[in-house]
Amino acid sequence: MDSTQTEVLDIFTRTRALLRGHFVLRSGLHSGHYFQCAQVCQDMVAVTRLAELLIAKLGGVKFSTVLAPAMGGLVIGQEVARQTKTRYIFAEKENNVLVLRRGFKFAPGEPVLIVEDVVTRGGRVVECINLIRAAGGVPVAVAMLVDRSAATTRFDIPAISLLELSFPTYPADQVPTELAKIPVEKPGS
């Protein structure tokens, strides 16, 4: 683990954003670990630092807008946009599908950075990529705080993460006995 990953893990641990127990993830999979980014997002000094670290990893990625999926990406997306002095918008669920509302639009060819908190299987990121393209923008990269897939989830645009961890996940009918003994929590994203 490099010094950036160590610092990020320390921030998540200090803010109690990395939980241990028995959790059902948004994907429906079960895990003994859960990143509750809402906990870290209460600490604006930590959010500022996480955004600084994430921006530093973007290298030469050029964008004029940050798009974050609600709810998880809202705080970190806004902070990345604030620090880069770019426009910030968000996508939200409507009939269980991410959409642009509130008059948000993209100019034709507008370069857009997707910012997310935690990615396990990448479903919301793929929804954002498709949403941007359908609305005339160009998704240029996805920046995430935590890649739970340890870089096994692939997109057709570059993906940048601060922390890559792969905690085991299990379908509901394959939860190990020791994990099944722990009461299930679904903390929300």
Image (cartoon, helix red, strand yellow):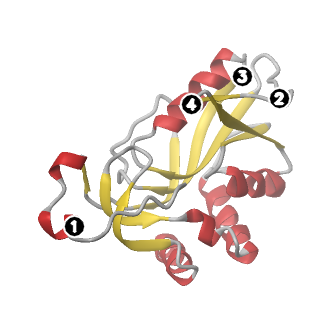
Q: Looking at the image, is mark 4 or mark 2 nearer the viewer? A: 4
CA separation in Å, label 3 and label 4: 22 Å
Residue 60 located left or right of residue 96: right
The amino acid sitting under disc 3 is Gly
Mark 1 or mark 3: whose residue is earlier in sequence: 3
Mark 3 closeness class: few <14, some 14–19, many ≥20 residues within 10 Å: many
In the depicted view, which residue is nearer to us: 43 or 114? 43
The amino acid sitting under disc 2 is Phe
Establish if 53 lies above or below 88.
below
CA separation in Å, label 2 and label 3: 12 Å
The amino acid sitting under disc 4 is Asn
Q: Which mark is residue 189?
A: none
Q: Which residue is mark 1?
A: 179
Query: Which image quarter is the C terminus in?
Result: bottom right
Mark 4 or mark 2: whose residue is earlier in sequence: 4
For this orientation, the residue located farthest to the left is 177
Mark 2 or mark 3: whose residue is earlier in sequence: 2
Q: State the image coordinates of residue 85 (x, y, percent, origin top left).
A: 86, 50
Mark 1 or mark 4: whose residue is earlier in sequence: 4
Q: State the image coordinates of residue 159 (x, y, percent, origin top left).
A: 50, 43
Q: Which mark is residue 96?
A: 4
Which residue is found at the position 69% from the left and 65% from the top?
52
Q: State the image coordinates of residue 148 (x, y, percent, origin top left).
A: 39, 55
